[in-house]
Image (spheres, helix red, strand yellow):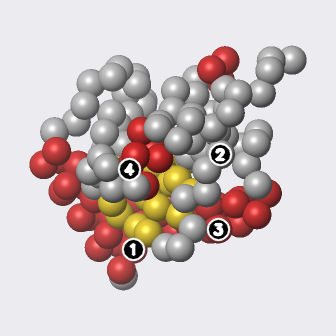
Amino acid sequence: MAEKTTYDSNNIFAKILRGEIPSHSVYEDDAVVAFMDVMPQGPGHTLVVPKAPSRNLLDADPGTFGPLFAVVQKVAVAVKKAFGADGVTILQFNEPASGQTVYHLHVHVIPRFEGIPLKPHSGQMEKPEVLAENAGKIRTALAN
C-alpha cells in the first residue's frame, strides 16, 4: 500500500476556491462549488468540488459526501436539461493509477449523447467564450 500523501493547498482547485484563479462558475453554496472544466471531454463538462480540503474520496471527511453529491445530482439534472443530453456520465478518480491529476476531491459531470464518444482529456483548453456560454446555459437550467 502506498504511503498517504498530504493535501497540497496550492493545487489548482484550492486556488480557484480562494479566487486566485478565475473559473466559469455555475453553482456555489456554503460547502460546494461547481464550475466548467477548462479541458472538457464534451460540451457542458462541469466539475463539482467540495470547499473542504481533501485529496480525494479516500481521505475526505465522510460529512463532505452528502452536500457534495446533492450538488452533483443538481448539476447533473441541469446539464442534461441545458444541453438536451440523452444521459450524464459521473466520474470521480482517486490517486494516479485511477487517472487523478488534480489532488483535490472533485466529481466530473458530463452530458452525454447517443453515439458520441467522450473526447480524450488531451490537455487542450477550451475557448473562454465557449466556457462562458456553456456556464450560462447551466446556470439558466439550475434557475428553472
Q: Mark 3 points at which residue?
A: 67
Q: Mark 1 points at which residue?
A: 142
- Mark 1, Cα crowd under 10 Å, few <14 / some 14-19 / many 20+, is some
Q: Mark 2 points at which residue?
A: 54
Where residue 99 sits, quadrant-wise, is top right
Tell me the distance, in whole angstroms, between the alpha carbons under discs 1 and 2. 27 Å
Q: Mark 4 points at which residue?
A: 16
Tell me the distance, in whole angstroms, between the alpha carbons under discs 4 and 2. 15 Å
Residue at 76% of width from left, 63% of height from top?
A: 63
At mark 2, the secondary structure is loop
Of callouts 4 and 3, the N-terminal one:
4
Look at the numbered discs 4 and 3 and tell me whether their residues touch, using CB distance below 8 Å.
no
Tell me the distance, in whole angstroms, between the alpha carbons under discs 1 and 4. 21 Å
Of callouts 3 and 2, the N-terminal one:
2
- Mark 4, Cα crowd under 10 Å, few <14 / some 14-19 / many 20+, is some
Q: Which of marks 1 and 2 is in front?
A: 2
- Residue 6 to residue 26: above or below: above
